[in-house]
Image: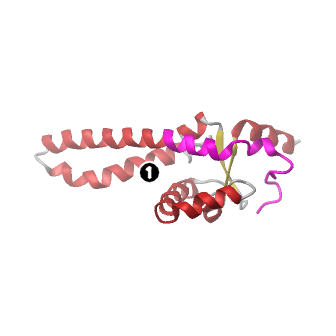
Amino acid sequence: MSSNLPDPHTAPELFEELLARRVAAYIIDVVILAAITLGTIIVGTVLGLVTLGAAFFALPFAIPIAIALYYGATLGSVKRATVGMRIMDIVLTPTRGAPLNGIRAFIHPVVFWVTCWFLTPFSFLFALFSPRREMLHDLIVGTLMVRRSPMERHWASSAL
């Protein structure tokens, strides 16, 4: 890990209530993703009827693409946070010195969903005992989730 990353012992405000905020952000994002999925299904159904069924074949591809576009537009943006993460004042920060580019912003949610599907209890238990409240997918991808407003103050003080 990079030495300029915040430490929970020296900057505890970055990690206050982080797991609860992550859970709330996850719930908000699931609601948004459900709305995106529903909208994609409605548009796909209308297009399927207009094209006499031809567009129905694209629907299984359109839903994952719409979800990937959501993550790319949010995690891949300058804000580095989904809508739920912004509401809960958390941000995704790279830990291995590499920038949070489009590939890493895309890989993070993919690894998140895979680890949650297959390793749910382990991933959450890991976060409970990790000093930085990292989940398993954060370690795999090389990211760190912290509170945004205190992190902005940390970035400002480290730039001096």
Residue 62 spot, x, y in % from top left: 32, 50
Residue 74 spot, x, y in % from top left: 53, 43
User: Residue visible at 50% across and 59% down?
Assistant: 116
User: Residue visible at 65% across and 41% down?
Assistant: 90
* The quarter of the displayed image where residue 49 is located: top left
User: Residue visible at 59% across and 34% down?
Assistant: 87
* Membership of 5 in magenta stretch: yes
Which quadrant of the rendered structure holds the C terminus? top right
User: Residue visible at 52% across and 45% down?
Assistant: 26
Q: Taking 77 as reference, is 1 above or below it?
A: below
Q: Is residue 80 visible?
A: no
**On the picture, is 140 further left or further right than 149?**
left
Give the residue at the far right of this rendering.
Answer: 160
Give the residue at the far left of this rendering.
Answer: 52
* Membership of 130 in magenta stretch: no
**On the picture, is 8 further left or further right than 103?**
right
Span highlighted in magenta in the image: 1-28
Q: Is residue 47 visible?
A: yes
Q: How many marks?
A: 1
* The quarter of the displayed image where residue 20 is located: top right
Residue 28 spot, x, y in % from top left: 50, 38
Q: Which residue is mark 1?
A: 68
Q: Taking 120 as reference, is 84 above or below it?
A: above
Q: Tell which of 19 and 82 is nearer to you.
A: 19
CA neighbours of label 1 inside 10 A, class few (<14), some (14 to 19), many (20+):
some
Q: Taking 127 as reference, is 49 above or below it?
A: above
